[in-house]
Amino acid sequence: MPSRRSFRLDSLGVEWARPGLVAGVDEAGRGPLAGPVVAAAVILDELRPVKGLADSKVLTPLRRERLADLVRARALCVSIAEASVEEIDRLNILGATLLAMQRAVAGLRLTPHRVVVDGNRLPPLPMPAAAVVQADARVAAVSAASILAKVQRDRLCATLHEQWPAYGFAGHKGYATLAHLEALRKHGACPAHRRSFAPVREVCGGEPLF
């Protein structure tokens, strides 16, 4: 059985005295100009720790892939969810991100008693939750979630590259690099682009989204 010790994050300004399962939540893909935003929720097993967890941004792609496999193998449960490009354009990126996080928590096989979310905003959740800035570098379950979300998002970008190779999604992952912006100017926007984002809206001639 997993350990169910009291969960304390005193140094982060969070203290929950009651024991229970804790899920870490993080997202990937808020800044890019294309593709969905991805969120992951992870409940780690304290009896099967995963060494080397860290903010996904400081890890190499190969290290992220290996850690993602370990998290899937050793965690009590994981869940990955998305908010689509259409939802991003309709709700705005913050609203879509919170929606993806909400879906990730709802998709967990086990219901957590508490949730820790990276950042300063919380999605609507039916259980107590805390938003902690830089939790992806400070809380193991959130680090694990950040890795899963990033790996999934990168895989989605590889699929986008297969569908629309002219944009180079496999390389820049949808971010506004010079090469990506040049491709946008040359080819216009593809269905995977977020038309509510200014660089995409400009190449679309500022046309209404709906």
Image (cartoon, rainbow, N blue to C red):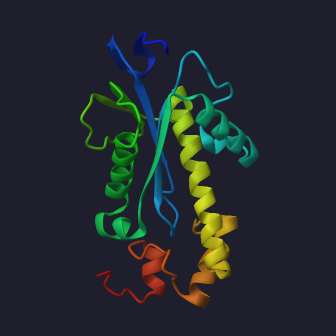
Q: Locate residue 160: give its quadrant.
A: bottom right
The answer to whether residue 3 is left or right of residue 174 is: left
State the image coordinates of residue 24 (x, y, percent, origin top left): 45, 33
Reply above or below: 123 against 158.
Answer: above
Q: Image point 27% across, 28% down: which residue?
A: 128
State the image coordinates of residue 155 (x, y, percent, origin top left): 63, 58
Reply above or below: 120 against 116.
Answer: below
In the rendered picture of this protein, how many numbered marks are placed on residues? 0
- Residue 54 appears in the rendering: no
Reply above or below: 87 against 28.
Answer: below
Reply above or below: 199 against 203.
Answer: above
In this view, the residue in front, 2 or 173, is 2
The answer to whether residue 106 is left or right of residue 34 is: left
Q: Image point 73% across, 41% down: which residue?
A: 63
In this view, the residue in front, 77 or 116, is 77
Q: Image point 38% across, 73% down: which residue?
A: 196
In this view, the residue in front, 146 or 21, is 21
State the image coordinates of residue 194 (x, y, percent, origin top left): 44, 72
- Residue 104 appears in the rendering: yes
